[in-house]
Amino acid sequence: MIPFVVPVLFSSAQQAVQTTTATLGSEGVVLRTLKLPRMLARVSMALYLPDGQGPEVVVGEVAEVHPAAPPEMPGFLANFVDLPPSSRQRIEAAVARAAGEHRGFSRRSVDLEVEVAGTGPAHAVDISSGGLFLRDGHAAGRGQALELRLDLHDGKGTADTRAVVVRAADDGRGMQFLDFGPSFRERLYMYLEAADREHAG
């Protein structure tokens, strides 16, 4: 498995959660989430790979569980169960491309207003479907999960999500989205598409 952040919808024990992956390979996946399933549970996952196709639906069995305990990262490892050859080929192709490009989805440079629960206003200087880089002058260590409100300029109010600090630097924090609401992914995609059109124009 390699570091590979893509949106994913997983369900287990009548719980459906939209979040992101941390690593991915043809044998399994690590998901970043605070909503942890039990060990050995079967989870159904829809992986939104960056190849322009629909989600790849797979089943996994939970092999490791990691509660939120900074600086450790919250989430779980699921090994794939009865992965169809077509799914394996698609995942391997996406992983190979990500390994060559060092990132699954490209980041866009932005100046985006963000409200951080507990610390106040901040701004993101780049963003992708998997996360953002935040500058706000507040210290936050790796593994800390924060509530964010993003102004996506779509007239629908703030887009709310959680994000976990995956990299702490002197000039800010690299953050990965996790456990977001049902409309967040769609609104973020629309924002990113609009940013691409504006850049191309």
Image (spheres, rainbow, N blue to C red):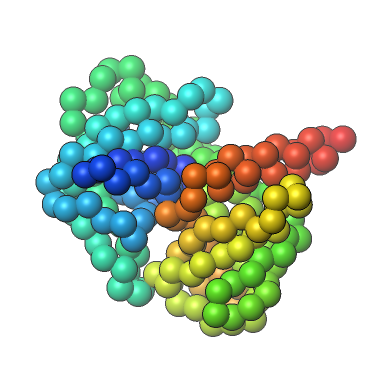
Residue drawn at x 69%, y 56% is 157
Q: Residue furthest left?
A: 40
Q: Nearer the viewer, residue 96 or 83?
A: 83
User: In the rendered image of this protein, does residue 129 appear above or below residue 54?
Assistant: below
Quarter of the image for residue 158 reads: bottom right
Q: Nearer the viewer, residue 29 or 145?
A: 145
Q: At which x and y percent is residue 161?
A: 52, 58
Q: At which x and y percent is residue 140?
A: 50, 78
Drawn side of residue 10 relative to residue 111, left or right: left
Residue drawn at x 48%, y 24% is 54
Residue drawn at x 26%, y 20% is 84
Q: At which x and y percent is residue 37?
A: 22, 52
The quadrant of the image that shows the N terminus is: top left
Drawn side of residue 194 relative to residue 16, left or right: right
Specify whether residue 100 is in view.
Answer: yes
Total marks in image: 0
Quarter of the image for residue 89 reads: top left
The quadrant of the image that shows the C terminus is: top right
Q: Residue furthest right?
A: 201
Residue drawn at x 21%, y 57% is 65
